[in-house]
Amino acid sequence: MSTTNEKRIPSAFVPHGGGPLPILGDRAHKTLTAWLSNFVSTHLSRNKPTSCLIISAHWEAPVTTLQTGDTSSLYYDYYGFPKEAYNLNYPLKPAPELAKRVAGLLDKAGIQHKSDSERGFDHGVFIPMMLLFPDGDIPTMQISLVGGLDPEVHIKLGEALAPLRDEGVFILGSGMSYHNMRGFGSADANDVSIPFHKYLRDVLTDDGKPYEEKKDKLVGWKSAPRARDNHPREEHLIPLMTIFGTAKGSQGRGQEVFFDDVAGAKCAGYIFEE
């Protein structure tokens, strides 16, 4: 007989790369594109998700905001790319029923929220999803970051959403573990990014640390080695905090399943399976 854990969908944090470049065949994104393309067969083959909830670095709102509209429009929120980047077509299904369930969980947790029935999917959603689920057959909704980018607020958000993992929902954080626009491709990019990633690895993959200790380390991420050199502004890191929160029941235990160059700097991806 299957147990709840056997049915639980992993949650994950993935780097989404630079704008549309993972889809456009950019050589500096080749490894990331290949990894994202194989992610579902590698990590989600046991239980295919029935829907997907994504928190992207590219949507901030004063309070947690839920995408509730019956729309699959794409929001091309990037600039200076070839014409084809603005003609991408991806028939991603909306998930209005999931939005209702998410609202109920946030109410239960006492988390203030609002809805947005008009917003389309930004590139932090549709670029990785085009590689993860090329058929666009997974009903998907997006949830915003909260203005102020408080790590503790976003971890609490993940904790509230955790029950969805036992209901067939794939919870995905889309960001970048390194995001310094001036640093990509620089001579010292890896000297900067490697010690910060060691900090993330030590916190997330340590089976011996209790959840609250890990949480404290993540909340205090600004004290990590070269923290601000990796994230002059932390909007691309914060989705990882929410994904960590979804794994409270397994002591925040994660695996680093991607670590490679993306656009000239080391970036990582993490998965939380149990």
Image (spheres, grey):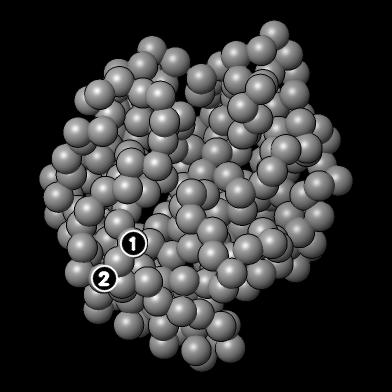
| Disc 2 + disc 1, Cβ < 8 Å | yes
User: Which of the 4 quarters of the picture holds residue 210?
Assistant: bottom right
Quadrant where the image shows the N terminus: bottom left
Expressed as whole percent of the image width and height from the top left, the position of residue 73 reads 22, 53
What residue does disc 1 label?
119
Q: Residue furthest right?
A: 223
Residue occupying the point 48% across, 38% down: 15
Q: Nearer the viewer, residue 151 or 89?
A: 89
User: Which of the 4 quarters of the picture holds residue 7?
Assistant: bottom left
Q: Amino acid at mark 2?
A: Gly
* Helix, strand or loop for disc 1: loop
Expressed as whole percent of the image width and height from the top left, the position of residue 248 reads 60, 69
Image position of 173 (left or right of 118): right
* Helix, strand or loop for disc 2: loop
Classify 249 as above or below 240: below
Classify 204 as above or below 113: above
Q: Nearer the viewer, residue 237 or 214?
A: 237
Q: Nearer the viewer, residue 45 or 129?
A: 129
Residue occupying the point 71% across, 33% down: 230
Expressed as whole percent of the image width and height from the top left, the position of residue 127 reads 33, 39
Q: Amino acid at mark 1?
A: Arg
Image position of 176 (left or right of 165): right
Count of residue discs: 2
Residue occupying the point 79% across, 62% down: 216
Whether residue 11 can be seen here: no
Image position of 186 (left or right of 176): right
Q: CA distance from mark 2 to mark 1?
A: 7 Å
Q: In the image, which disc is placed on residue 69?
A: 2
Image position of 36 (left or right of 150): left
